[in-house]
Amino acid sequence: MVKKVGFVGLGIMGLPMAGNLLKVGYELCVYDVVPTAVEQAVAQGATAAASPKEVAQNSEVIITMLPSEAIAEQVILGSDGLVEGMAPGAAVVDMSTISPIGAKKIAAALKEKGLNMIDAPVSGGDVGAKEASLSIMAGGDEATFQKVLPLLQKMGKNVNLVGDSGAGQVSKACNQIVVGLAIAAVAEALVFAKKNGVDPAKVRNALLGGFAQSRVLELHGQRMLDRNFTPGGKVHLHKKDTEIAVEAAKQLGIYLPCNALLSQLWNSVTAMGGSQWDHSSIVKCLEMLSNTEVTPG
Ligand code: NAD
C-alpha cells in the first residue's frame, strides 16, 4: 500500500487536496514555487522539498496540480523534474487540466523510463477540493489506477477510470464544455430576468426546483447575484480548458459551435481585466452588452 506521497502545486485546488491526504495519515512531501503555499502545507504536517526532483526521491506516487500544460511538462519531465527523482515503478498522477495529447505525450515519455502516469483531472471546484467530494476522471492502465485509487478516494467521491492515457483529459474537456455553457446560460437567464423587471434572485429560486436545476445555477447563480467574483475557478483556467476543446475540434475537423462562442466570451471577460476573476464573471460581459447588473430586486 502506498504511504509516501508527493504533491506539487499547492494552489486553490492543490492545497486543500493535499490537506485531505494529510488528514488521513499519508506522509506528504510537497513543492510549490510560492513559499507561502508550501508553509501552509507544512503547517498541516507536510515536509517541504527544494524541487520536484526531491519530491520524487521521497515518494512512491506523486500528484501534480498545476496551472498549465507547459508547467506540468516542465515539472514532470524538465530539469530537476520528477522524472529525475522517481524510483523504478513509481507513478505520477497529473490532476491538472491539460490537453489529451499533452497527457499522452508525457505518459509516453515516462513509460520509456519504466515509470507510470495516470491523467486524473477533476471537477467540483474549490468547494469539492475542500470537501473531498471531487469528481475524478482518470486515464491510464488498470494496474496503476488500482495502485493510486485509495489516494484518489480520499480527495474525491466519484472516481472513474474512463480509458487509456488521455481519456481522463478528454472527459475533463467534455466537463468544461458543459460547465462553461451552463455558466453562460445562467448568466443570460439572469440578465433576461433583470431587463424584464423581474427579480433575478427570485427567478433563480424558482428555477432551482425544476428541469433547469444545476450546481452551476445553485452556486454560480448565487455568486452572480452576490457579485462575488473572487475565485474559485479562475477565468484564465477555464479559458485554457475551452481552448483545449477548440483546438482538439480543429484537429478532429468537427463542429463545436457553442464551445467556440464560449471561447469568445472568455476573451471578452479577459479584455475587461477579468483573467483572475471567478468564471461566474462571464455575467459581467453579458451585463455590459445589455447595460444592466443582475443584483437582486
Ligand atoms: P492555482 O493557480 O490556484 O494553483 C496552481 C499552483 O501551482 C500555484 O500554487 C502555483 O504557485 C503552482 N505552480 C505554478 N508553477 C509551478 C511550478 N513550476 N512548480 C511548482 N508549483 C507551481 O490553480 P488551481 O485553481 O489550483 O488549478 C490547478 C489546476 O486544476 C489547473 O490545471 C486547473 O485548470 C484545474 N482545476 C481548477 C479548478 C478550480 O475551480 N480552481 C477546478 C478543476 C480543475
Image: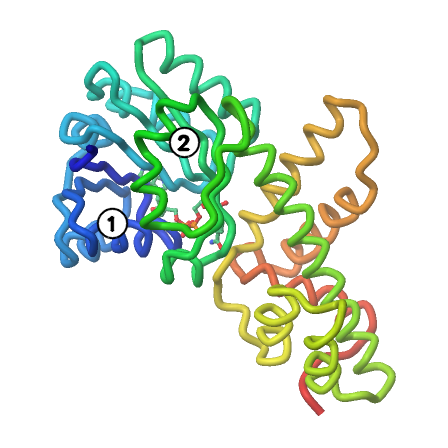
**Earlier along the polypeptide chain: callout 2 or callout 1?**
1
Question: According to the image, label 1 marks what residue?
Answer: 21
Of residue 256 and residue 162, the one placed in the foreground of this image is 162
Of residue 213 and residue 97, the one placed in the foreground of this image is 213
Give the mark toward the camera: 2 or 1. Answer: 1
The reply, left or right, for residue 251 in relation to residue 84 is right
Q: Position of residue 63 (x, y in %)?
A: 32, 36
- Please name the residue shown 54% across and 62% down the image: 278
Decide: is 115 above or below 33: above
Q: Count residues near mark 1 (Cα–Cα under 10 Å), then give few for <14, some for 14-19, many for 20+.
A: many
The reply, left or right, for residue 9 in relation to residue 138 is left
Q: Quadrant of residue 1?
A: top left
Q: Position of residue 234 (x, y in %)?
A: 52, 55
Question: According to the image, label 2 marks what residue?
Answer: 72
- Please name the residue shown 49% across and 17% down the image: 105
Q: Amino acid at mark 1?
A: Leu
Of residue 246 and residue 132, the one placed in the foreground of this image is 132
Q: Position of residue 25 (x, y in %)?
A: 16, 49
Residue projecting furthest to the top: 112
SS label for mark 2: helix
SS label for mark 1: helix
Q: Quadrant of residue 296?
A: bottom right
Asked if the beta carbon under badge 1 is closer than 8 A to the nearest atom of ligand 1, the reply is no
- Please name the residue shown 35% across and 51% down the image: 11
Asked if the beta carbon under badge 2 is closer than 8 A to the nearest atom of ligand 1, the reply is yes
Decide: is 31 above or below 10: above
The reply, left or right, for residue 26 in relation to residue 153 is left
Q: Position of residue 48 (x, y in %)?
A: 14, 43
Of residue 198 and residue 151, the one placed in the foreground of this image is 151
Q: Quadrant of residue 80?
A: top left
